[in-house]
Image: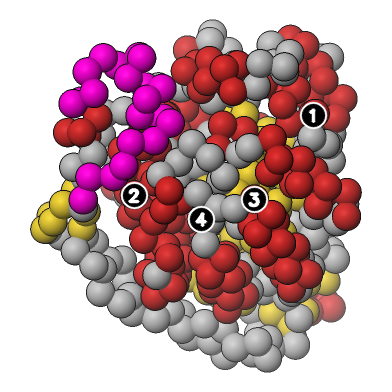
Amino acid sequence: MFSPSRVTVNRCVRLTFFISIPEFTFFHRYLMNWRGHPNDMLSHSALVHCQPIPNPTPLPMPELNSHSPITLIRGTFLDLVADPFQEPIAHSVRYIPDGLLVIENGIIQAFGHYTDLNSTYGHLPITTYSGQLIVPGLIDAHIHYPQSEMIAAYGEQLLEWLEKYTFPTEAKFQNPDHARQIAAFCLDELLRNGTTTAVILPTIFPESVQILFEEAERRRMRVIAGQVLMSRNAPSYLVNDAPTALAETREQIQHWHGRGRSLYAITPRFAATSTEEELKLAGQLRVEFPQVYIHTHLSENRKELALIRELFPHATDYLHVYEHHGLVGNRSIFAHCIHLSDSELQRFAQSGAMIAYCPLSNLFLGSGLFKLHQAKSQPFHIPIGLATDVGGGTSFSLLKTMAAAYTIAQLQEQTISPFQMMYLATLGSAKALGLQEQLGNFQPGKEADFVVFDTQATPLMKLRNPHVPAQSLDELSSQLFALIILGDDRAVAATYVNGSLIYQQ
Ligand SMILES: [Zn+2]
């Protein structure tokens, strides 16, 4: 049986050297029109990097054949069985204060009240989590693994931030050793935060994609990822040749899509960094492989919108650029979507595409306030998943991301319930990704990904939540809200992937 251990977190401890000044790119020229003096960009180019991070202590991974035939988990369970944006809490929330989860070969075989299942399974060994709250594994619908090491980068909004911090960092992923180190770190950090599924952008380098899938496979994590396509408007060290990149993407689809828990996404970074030719080739590849995802960014920042108008003068709006190339439909994932017009929202809603809502990133980069309630309500009902967008987002924690979503709702004189927030990070995201048969709640037949939260993880949380488990849905709502607002990785007691314990405090 796999023996869990605490994950070692490496830190960059000392600033040691500056990278060379990158060449001027389209963004530089474009941004000068906004920012003024070109020397600003030169000084901004003097990037500070950390020392190479020492090799992380390897996590003891569950062996692929290490499943005991049946695993039993007893504790307090919460999951969503319907959309709480549309259904009353009594119909959408399932709460079992003393429940039993029965797992066989990574799949949920039975779930219900302990008293109902005890006669069938009570003779088998049981792992009990008393006083804690077990929820389905969280789903991060949009994250950049190479940006793990440049999180919390100071002082810029999207386009400048890409130029100054992101592109030079992503250049380092030509080095497979570096890519493996950061991919492992990112996946372990996700697990440490209770996230068991993620939609991930690597870089333009094929090895950085291969390595990510390998590391996810070692952890049995479900990931959706694909080679980032960038054929213009980036430094030359980060620009691909479109036909070559699409040929590499085709090879990767054939190797990785549907292998184990891995799924592939054709990933143009965003319209501004792809030529018309590249978008067209991406659309053709989607026709060839209709089962794979499309993953990109849309309508994040107002300067970005102006840039798109300049680059695509024929397009009626930003969404039209992607529509024109057949990139909008089922299994299309668009991060942000803050500034969509009513027409764009209407067409988006009809397409079946999903929005990856990134509230922490939107606040940190000053991108704007996403209108969640508009997108989720009549007449749109757009599928939405919650996302950290690290490193635009400032935490790997989807609890902190939920808290940011709550803040943004409040700034718009709206509110969002703790159950709605949990839905966006579990069943809502699973449905939006078309993975509701595999993920999102504790229905038998689904994959056994789940997280054990300690709602009393800190002295303040214990003061706020003195009595567990909750005795009613009202009490549960209050405790869950406090977990979301006060909690982070400290509140993750354990994380299970595909039925195996993979992280424990
Ligand atoms: Zn992003």
Q: Which mark is residue 323?
A: 1
Query: Separation of disc 3 and disc 4 at Cα?
Result: 14 Å
Ranked by sequence position, the earlier of labels 2 and 4 is 2
Mark 2 residue element? helix
CA–CA distance between discs 1 and 2?
Answer: 31 Å
Question: Which residue is rendered at x = 58% and y = 13% of the image?
Answer: 414
The residue that mark 4 highlights is 203
Residue 425 makes an appearance in the image = no
Circle 1 — which element?
helix
Q: Which residues are magenta?
A: 20-40
Q: Sequence order check: which comes first, mark 1 or mark 4?
A: 4
Residue at the spot 53% in from the left edge and 34% down from the top edge:
358
Tell me which corner region of the image, top left, top right, bottom left or bottom right, holds residue 252.
Answer: bottom right
Nearest the eye: 356 or 493 = 356
Q: Nearer the viewer, mark 3 or mark 1?
A: 3
Q: CA distance from mark 2 to mark 3?
A: 21 Å
Q: CA distance from mark 1 to mark 4?
A: 24 Å
Decide: is 319 above or below 385. above
User: Which amino acid type is marked by label 3?
Assistant: Ala
Asked if residue 384 lies left or right of residue 110, the reply is left
Q: Nearer the viewer, residue 100 or 260?
A: 260
Give the x, y percent position of residue 223.
64, 61
What amino acid type is highlighted by mark number 2?
Pro
Residue 242's disc number: 3
Q: Does residue 208 belong to the magenta stretch?
A: no
Label 4: how many residues lie within 10 Å, few (<14), some (14-19) or many (20+)?
many
| Circle 3: element type | helix
Residue at 46% across, 22% down: 367
